[in-house]
Image: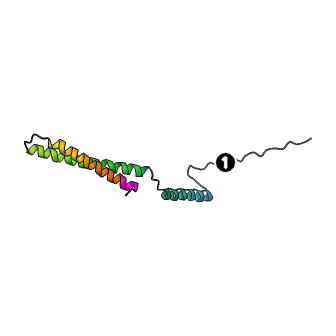
Amino acid sequence: MTREPTTPTPRPKEDKPKGAYEPDDLADVVARKQARKERARAEGKHGLAYGFGLFGLVGWSVAVPTLLGISLGVWIDSRSTSPYSWTLMLMIAGLTMGCFNAWYWVRKEAGDD
């Protein structure tokens, strides 16, 4: 009688809680994350939070001058009897100033000084 070779049965893996690492695994994970962070800094890539921050900066740099122009225009219109709408004129001026302000910040953040 010849015996057929048997394949070894795999050992059951221990059920570890998610996020639990062995000491060697932990060192590897930390090293990979550190290398990824250093590559991102060297390449100049920014994350999602940076994009949202820049988006907010651009939005506020347009919204604030526009709202200031509108409020100043409403105040002037309430105090004068001019045939011209100061609200509309100052809104357009504030919007224009806000767009130039946003352009300045985006250009500065892009590094095209």
Q: Is residue 84 above or below residue 103?
A: above
User: Could you say where residue 68 lies in the image, as x and y percent from the top left?
Assistant: 21, 48
User: Could you say where residue 61 lies in the image, as x and y percent from the top left?
Assistant: 29, 50
Q: Amino acid at mark 1?
A: Lys
Mark 1 is surrounded, within 10 Å at the Cα level, by few (under 14), some (14 to 19) or many (20 or more) other residues, namely few
- Taking the magenta stretch, the answer to whether it contains residue 29 is no
Which of the 4 quarters of the picture holds residue 9? top right
User: Could you say where residue 46 lies in the image, as x and y percent from the top left?
Assistant: 45, 53
- Color theme of the render: rainbow
Name which residue lies at 29% across and 50% down.
100
Name which residue lies at 25% across and 46% down.
95
The span picked out in magenta is 106-113
Query: In terms of depth relative to the viewer, which is nearer, 31 or 80?
Result: 80
Q: Residue reaching furthest right?
A: 1
Name which residue lies at 86% across and 42% down.
4
SS under mark 1:
loop
Describe residue 75's horizontal placement relative to residue 105 as left or right.
Answer: left
User: Which residue was labeled with disc 1?
Assistant: 13
